[in-house]
Image (spheres, rainbow, N blue to C red):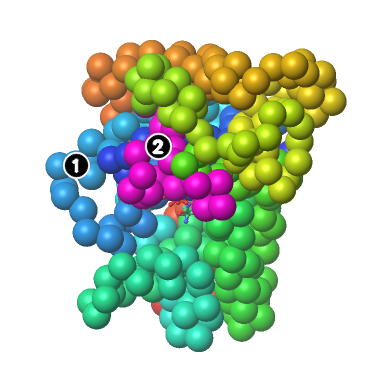
Amino acid sequence: MATIFSGIQPSAQAPHIGNYIGALKQWVELQEGNDALYCVVDLHALTVPQDPKKLQESIDQTYALLLAIGLDPEKSTVFVQSQVPAHAQLGWVLQTISTMGELSRMTQFKDKSAKFKDSIPSGLFTYPTLMAADIVLYDTQIVPVGEDQIQHVELARNLAQRFNNRFGDTFVVPNVQIKKEGARIMSLADPTKKMSKSDENKHAAVFLNDPLDVIQEKLSRAVTDSQTEITFDPERKGLYNLLSIYKILTGKSEVEIEQDMKGKGYKEFKQEVAHQVITLVEPIQTRMQELLSDRTALHDSMKRSAEKAASRAQKKLEEVYSKIGL
Ligand code: ATP
Ligand code: LTN
């Protein structure tokens, strides 16, 4: 049994199938037989400007989605970050032992700050120290994420080690866990770019809350190539991406899929992929609507999980405060 921690930002835009395949699917698998904590990281969302009403709604939506994909509050602790004050408190402590140099090297900071020209919010810069706090507060051993978060988990490891060296053994040094397959699902509109929530091209990503006909339409338009044979060839990026999605969702082997697709055209194959995606998202959408229709029950569940997480986090924070002389 391992302690697992991961987080997802609440956003007005629902997660896409890249988020699901790269991260969320593993969360569900890992809750079996492990001590798993999953967090809606609303404090992280504040690193870019937010509308308060919309943020509140996004938190509910994201929490409901996590339950709808199969996370079970009886098996894992699914909670909202801002409801456990120790995250922000430890975040500050870790920020004081981080350096400008190491934070400047974060590629996500470079990408996201580029959009702000002169007035880059400083939260965008210090964000990885809060993420490190999220992880080390619970003696986390394994952090399941998509590829783009490896650098942040590396930083969490460095900060944990640095703190331990300076103040004595306090934190477990966490390990990142990346799925070999699906860690980087590509855009359907441009398979050289990763599938992203913020892509301006409406056909780049399939979102878990997309209407079923929209899913069909997006997949039928997915960029492929002018060849005809359906085979796993990483050089044929668009097709390879669709095949990877199909492979993960069906659990079939590459040989099996290539056999099944012999003689079939792209049109038919894309319909098959759409069918698999719809089979995945339809029950999730139904469950999510049910959960969102009773906000009192939803908020009660949030509160209970936050209390569970907080009692663990508070102990670690007290240990940290005492070690650093507070
Ligand atoms: P985006 O770039 O789509 O806006 P994000 O990384 O900001 O995504 P989060 O909701 O914070 O989105 O990420 C949730 C999880 O999904 C993270 O573990 C991240 O690594 C993973 N992830 C994001 N995009 C992809 C992708 N295209 N393929 C696989 N995993 C992904
Ligand atoms: N930075 C991550 C979300 C995140 C996270 C975490 C992931 C915040 N805290 C702790 C794993 C562990 C993102 O943007 N996807």
Q: Give whichever of discs 1 and 2 has the lower sequence position.
A: 1
Kind of residue sitting beneath label 1: Lys
Q: Which mark is residue 147?
A: none
Residue 24 position (above or below residue 283):
below
Q: Which residue is mark 1?
A: 54
| Residue occupying the point 27% across, 76% down | 117
Residue positioned 56% across, 58% down in the render: 149
What SS does tag 2 mark?
loop
Q: Which residue lies under the disc numbered 2?
A: 203
Image location of residue 142, percent across then percent down: 67, 50
Predominant SS along the magenta part:
loop
Does residue 117 sit above or below 300 in this rendering? below
Residue 102 lies left or right of residue 162; in this view the side is left
| Dot 2 beta carbon under 8 Å from ligand 1 | no
Judged from the image, the secondary structure of the residue bearing numbered disc 1 is helix
Mark toward the viewer: 1 or 2: 2
Would you say residue 273 is visible in this rendering? no
Q: CA distance from mark 1 to mark 2?
A: 24 Å
Residue 13 is situated, as x and y percent measured from the top left of the image, at 32, 39
Q: Which quadrant of the figure contains the N terminus?
A: top right
- Which of 91 and 208 lies nearest the eye of the viewer? 208
Which quarter of the figure is the C terminus placed in? bottom left
Q: Is residue 254 left or right of residue 267?
A: right
Give the residue drawn at x 61%, y 33%.
242
Q: Is residue 301 magenta?
A: no
- Name the foreground residue: 273 vs 292: 273
From which residue to which does the magenta span run?
190-209
Whether residue 197 appears in magenta in the rendering, the answer is yes
Where residue 155 sits in the image (x, y, percent)?
Answer: 58, 70
